[in-house]
Image (cartoon, helix red, strand yellow):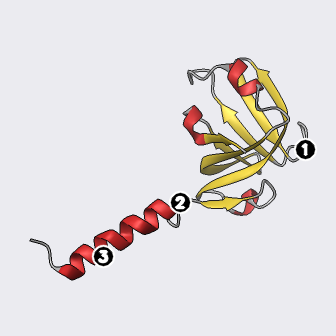
């Protein structure tokens, strides 16, 4: 049987996780550039959806080529481009590791579960 203090610790930790306190930090598209290599949630309005050679991009902040932040979806990712296009003009939150590509922050999409429409 677990001691009362162990049980209290487990219940407290479960409450913290359930409340979202251990969830990735939320950033604006402009703040993301200072958090390369970190796992975070970036929330902003998708100003442009575009595709090139099967690659899909959801750009925030400004339109390409001056986008502030990008959600990148590789061709081999089995996420419908039609589904992604529906985020254009919408505010979304995307969670993942922030990578810097040509000095611009992006999150590589591997699952549609990474995106929440706001």
Q: In this view, does 7 lie above or below 95?
A: below
Q: In which quarter of the image is the N terminus?
A: bottom left
Q: Earlier in the sequence, mark 3 or mark 2?
A: 3
First reached walking from the N terminus: tag 3 or tag 1: 3
Horizontal and vertical percent position of residue 26: 66, 60
Quote the CA–CA distance across marks 1 and 2.
27 Å
Q: Distance between the residues labelled 3 and 2?
A: 19 Å
Q: Residue 62 carries which label?
A: 1
Secondary structure beneath label 1: loop
> Which residue was labeled with disc 2?
23
Q: In which quarter of the image is residue 65?
A: top right
Q: What element carries label 3?
A: helix
Label 1 or label 2, whichever lies nearer to me, is 2
Quick one: which residue is furthest to the bottom in this view? 5
Left-right relation of 80 to 6:
right
Reading the image, the residue beneath label 3 is 9
Residue 56's x, y, as percent? 72, 26
Quadrant in the picture for residue 13: bottom left
| Distance between mark 3 and mark 1 Cα atoms | 46 Å
Query: In the image, residue 112 lies at what x, y percent?
Result: 59, 32
Q: Which of marks 1 and 2 is nearer the N terminus?
A: 2
Kindly report which numbered mark, 3 or 1, lies closer to the viewer in this rendering.
3
State the quadrant of the C terminus.
Answer: top right
Residue contact between numbered discs 1 and 2, judged by CB atoms under 8 Å:
no
Q: Which of marks 3 and 2 is in front?
A: 3
Q: What element carries label 2?
A: loop
Residue 19 left/right relative to 3: right
User: Looking at the image, is 8 positioned above or below residue 101?
Assistant: below
């Amino acid at each position: 049987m677990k001691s009362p203090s162990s049980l209290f610790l487990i219940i407290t930790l479960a409450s913290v996780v359930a409340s979202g306190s251990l969830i990735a930090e939320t950033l604006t598209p402009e703040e993301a550039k200072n958090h390369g290599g970190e796992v975070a949630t970036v929330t902003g309005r998708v100003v442009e959806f575009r595709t090139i050679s099967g690659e899909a991009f959801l750009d925030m902040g400004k339109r390409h080529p001056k986008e502030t932040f990008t959600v990148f979806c590789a061709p081999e990712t089995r996420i419908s481009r039609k589904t992604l296009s529906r985020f254009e003009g919408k505010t979304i939150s995307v969670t993942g590791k922030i990578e810097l590509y040509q000095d611009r922050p992006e999150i590589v999409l591997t699952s549609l579960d990474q995106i929440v429409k706001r």
